[in-house]
Amino acid sequence: MRQFLLWCSQNRWLAAHVPRWPFARRAVKRFMPGEDFGTALSAASSLKQQNVGALFTLLGENVSDGAGAAAVVKDYEDILAAASGIGAEVSVKPTHLGLDVDPKAAYANLLRLARAVADAKSFLWVDMEGSDYVDRTLDLYVRVREEAPAVGIAIQAYLKRTPADITALLKSKTAIRLVKGAYAEPASIAYTGKRQVDANYLALTAYMLPEVKRGNLRLVLGSHDVDLIRNAWRYGEAIGLERERFEIAMLYGIRTEEQLRLAGEGFSVRCLISYGDAWYAWYLRRLAERPANLLFAARQLLP
Ligand code: FDA
């Protein structure tokens, strides 16, 4: 089912038609407060009152021309100004900034965005996409971080190359959001069983936490797997890490009670809030993470 849903996420016909179906539009509301940024901003404001920070992302990927990529940068610049009071951060996909079209322009776009984020005293996260993009994304990130340090990168625990990538990143000060990985990858390069992915995730976290303690790394655990997060915290506690430096990020609409509980216990929690109308592929990846979500989507077919 996971493979089928991930195949659907890449299908052009479905991508062109599904977003027009009313039941799909109703179903996606579970994972995003609304398509317009104003709705995302008010969701962020109410979460802030409960000590949960926000991380905004404009939905979309694989833009096919330079103008599309430039519009994405402009959108983020606008929302940074609008969201200045709430301490939100932003997260962006390299292919949304034109990595498929022109790598040099994608670098210029990312750098421009990183500088705008620094001016707004915010923080920019670079999402990690499918494995074909990993080398190019790491290269973009390392070069941009040399110019603008308030930038971090998502790293996927399911990839077998990840320990080497993390070791290379840790040679200088860096910021990593560790996620399990959301794409369809072959067993030759990725762990495909949940147990192996979870074990790798925990081992990588234990490896990185001492660097957080030393101040060389900002680490965010991007996961809803609360058991795994609590196991990881045992390592943090053992090395005397302060709770507020143990950072967790989850997606809007998923395990909201746990987000509030962890924030109430003193951990740093952020909620990734998506907005925009290009939600199709992203939504299918959310379904693939938990095919039980299909039942919820199917229920939206009812009047
Ligand atoms: P896991 O899938 O094991 O789920 C643990 C539990 O969480 C489930 O039992 C369920 O209760 C709940 N849950 C998880 N997903 C759910 C869903 N979709 N609907 C309902 N409940 C769900 N990936 C990537 O490849 N590149 C990236 O840049 C990012 N960025 C990113 C940022 C943030 C803040 C998060 C939280 C996640 C990402 N991801 C990502 C996605 C990530 O790789 C992964 O696919 C999902 O987080 C699901 O894995 P979990 O760690 O939540 O564990």
Image: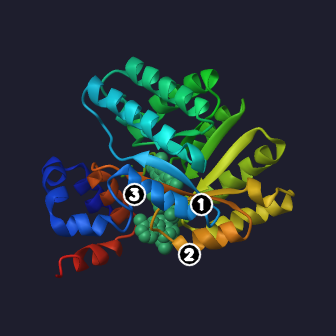
Which amino acid lies under the numbered mark 3 shown in the image of this protein? Thr
Of 88 and 179, nearer the camera is 88
Q: Distance between the residues labelled 1 and 3?
A: 14 Å
Return the disc, 1 or 2, that comes first in the chain's sequence. 1
- Compared across the picture, whether 175 is left or right of 275 comes to right
Which amino acid lies under the numbered mark 2 shown in the image of this protein? Glu
The picture places residue 234, in percent across and down from the top left corner, at: 77, 66
Residue under circle 3? 39
Label 2 lies in ligand 1 vicinity (Cβ under 8 Å)? no
Residue at 30% across / 59% down in the picture?
A: 284
Q: Residues within 10 Å of mark 2 (few under 14, many from 20)?
A: few
Residue under circle 2? 257
Q: Distance between the residues labelled 2 and 3?
A: 20 Å
Which amino acid lies under the numbered mark 1 shown in the image of this protein? Lys
The quarter of the rendered structure image containing the N terminus is bottom left
Residue at 82% across / 63% down in the picture?
A: 237
- Compared across the picture, whether 273 is left or right of 142 comes to left
Q: Can residue 191 be seen in this view?
A: no
Foreground tag (1 vs 2): 1
Q: Is residue 242 visible?
A: yes
For residue 98, above or below residue 248: above
Label 3 lies in ligand 1 vicinity (Cβ under 8 Å)? no
Return the disc, 1 or 3, that comes first in the chain's sequence. 3
